[in-house]
Image: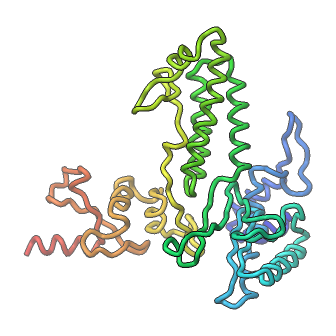
Amino acid sequence: MTVVSIAKLNSIPTINRLVRGWLKAGIFENGEISASEAGTPQGGIASPLLANIALHGLETVIMAAFPKRHRPAIIRFADDFVILCEDVAMLQTARNLAEKWLAEMGLTLKPNKTFITHMLYEYEGRTGFDFLGFTVRQFVVGKHHSKRGYKVVIKPSVKAQKRHLEQMEELIRTHRGSNQTALIAALNPRIRGWSNYHRACSAKKIFNRMDHQLHWKLSKWAKWQNPRKSCVWRKNRHWLRKRNRFDFSDGKATLAKYADTPIKRYVKVQGNKTPFDGDWAYWIDRLGRDPSKSKRVVTLLKRQEGRCMLCGLRFTSEDHLEVHHRDGNHNDNTPANLVLLHGHCHDEVHRTKRS
């Protein structure tokens, strides 16, 4: 695995030496360091990176074996991947290709995690599949809702919900002796992290359910804190009415709610684009940040949706950008007075003013 990973990295010597150092750094566990003779441990920090490097090229090999119009869709993250095909025969062929390609590297598919299923109808006792904490399924809908007669729905998986609630329950239990501010400070990052991860799918009802489940766990915490007080007293003590609802708050800190996270649909990254390819115009419009551009330029690009305010064309990474002051006063840098233009469009604006 080490030789294959380093060979496939195909990077500058500095990066190669860094990754090679990670592989030879050893394993620190329970205060002891042991030598790492066969890569990194399962769940290690470098494990996803090395898996991405080692399995790079798997998609190309599988798709090249099929005609262009009937190529399967392959989604991979680290060592987990899903192959979507039109029929079982194609899927079995793709599976055989994957097994053959992996065998050349000394790897195999894990039998208890490898299966064939249908997203709409039950197949071998399964319907749909779970992937990276999401459940992907198709559901029958009316002809006025979809011409195909079905709709793909992605939700947080039941396992992911159960695992998260168990973690939250354990966290609340460890804070039985803490005050409410400390408990809220511990819970908020977990709530925001989980909800932000799942906000790209149909998760609104799930978010409401998570709020409901967490409410009862917090009610148990409040009862443990004040066993001799009534339910009404505990409610008035630990919950405050804000925005026409009750929030778990002590007046200083307020617990975040899953349902407050807006659903934001995910847009697939184009082709082989990467944040390190230098196409700042694409990544600023997508991510809203870029270290090579000033904060003012990034803000204007987001506000203008990546387009020049004069010609209306999209900016590209080869374009020269200039900030234009609408009233000509360069001391007035308020957002309303600033627009982003192509270099030649900016010249055209000033040429028109002079004439």
Q: Quadrant of residue 134?
A: bottom right
* Residue placed most toward the observer, 354 or 159: 159
* Residue placed most toward the observer, 64 or 248: 248
Which quadrant of the rendered structure holds the N terminus? bottom right
On the image, the x and y values in percent for residue 234 come to: 56, 16
Which quadrant of the rendered structure holds the C terminus? bottom left
Residue farthest to the left? 355
Who's the residue at 58% across and 17% down the image? 231
Who's the residue at 68% across and 20% down the image? 176
* Residue placed most toward the observer, 289 or 7: 289
Q: Vertical placement of 123 versus 46: above or below?
A: below
Q: Vertical placement of 223 versus 310: above or below?
A: above
On the image, the x and y values in percent for residue 335 come to: 26, 52
* Colour basis: rainbow
On the image, the x and y values in percent for residue 330 come to: 19, 54
Q: Quadrant of residue 15?
A: bottom right
Q: Quadrant of residue 222?
A: top right
On the image, the x and y values in percent for residue 163 come to: 73, 43
Residue farthest to the front? 142
Q: Vertical placement of 238 versus 109: above or below?
A: above
Q: Is residue 272 left or right of residue 338?
A: right
Q: Is residue 175 left or right of residue 320?
A: right
Who's the residue at 71% across and 75% down the image? 84
Who's the residue at 72% across and 83% down the image? 63
Residue farthest to the top? 228
Q: Is residue 81 left or right of residue 29?
A: left
- Numbered marks: total: 0
